């Protein structure tokens, strides 16, 4: 009986989606995440003539090797204000973020904005994060259905984590929190518009 109700509802939703006007819905992939083997997908819908809602998520669920971990998932909803018309040219984004991570054994010497990323070289950090920020972006129109977006955002993230001796071992040596201020979003999005 429930299937009889569900099929017409699904069919009606598909018909309304097909009748949507151009530049009402977009799907996208962030090429920067793709370059790090992080699976990602974004969906953006028009809310008003100059406003859209972008929801993106990414997942990296595998280890690089026994001594290097770069596992995480992250969701980033973003309200966007377009200065011209939506999906075209300059925009401001107001985003939130949340996710979980398991990083370690990543050899580097990077330290900026009060965060020492070189600690990832010899330790593993496993925890969760939430935050928010503001971003500026620009959408280049490539064709009737294709855009290329560039976006950079800054903001705040709260991190809560456990610390482990090394990436491959399981000996917990402590727990801590960190208040991060700095870049919170970077994207080169390939966009398909419906």
Image (tube, grey):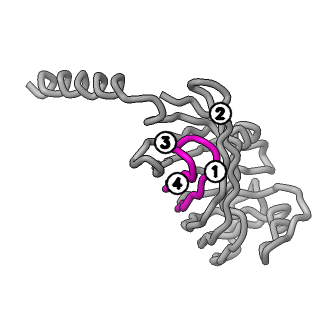
The magenta segment: 75-97
Alpha carbon separation for disc pair 3 and 1: 16 Å
Which residue is disc 2 drawn over? 141
Residues at circles 3 and 1 in contact by the CB criterion of under 8 Å: no
Quarter of the image for residue 158 reads bottom right
Among numbered discs 3 and 1, the one appearing first in the sequence:
3
Residue 44 has which mark?
Answer: 3
Q: Is residue 80 magenta?
A: yes
- Secondary structure category for the residue under label 3: strand
Residue that appears at 59% across and 58% down: 92
Mark 2 Cα-neighbour bin, 10 Å: few <14, some 14–19, many ≥20: some
Which residue is disc 4 drawn over? 80
- Secondary structure category for the residue under label 1: strand
- On the rendered structure, is 44 left or right of 169? left
Residue 193 drawn at (x, y percent): 52, 30
Alpha carbon separation for disc pair 3 and 2: 16 Å
């Amino acid at each position: 009986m429930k299937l009889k109700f569900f099929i017409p509802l699904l069919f009606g939703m598909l018909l309304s989606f097909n009748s949507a006007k151009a530049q009402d819905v977009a799907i996208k992939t962030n090429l920067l995440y793709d370059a790090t083997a992080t699976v990602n997908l974004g969906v953006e819908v028009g809310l008003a003539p100059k406003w859209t809602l972008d929801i993106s998520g990414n997942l990296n669920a595998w280890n690089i090797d026994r001594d290097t971990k770069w596992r995480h998932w992250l969701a980033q909803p973003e309200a966007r204000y377009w200065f011209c018309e939506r999906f075209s040219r300059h925009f401001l984004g107001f985003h939130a973020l949340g996710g979980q991570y398991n990083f370690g054994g990543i050899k580097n010497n990077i330290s900026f904005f009060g965060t020492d990323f070189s600690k990832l070289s010899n330790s593993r950090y496993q925890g969760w994060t939430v935050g928010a920020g503001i971003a500026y972006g620009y959408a280049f129109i490539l064709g009737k259905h294709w855009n290329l977006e560039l976006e950079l955002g800054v903001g705040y993230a709260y991190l809560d984590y456990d610390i482990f001796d090394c990436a491959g071992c399981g000996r917990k040596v402590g727990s801590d929190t960190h208040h991060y201020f700095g870049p919170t979003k970077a994207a080169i999005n390939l966009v398909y518009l419906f």
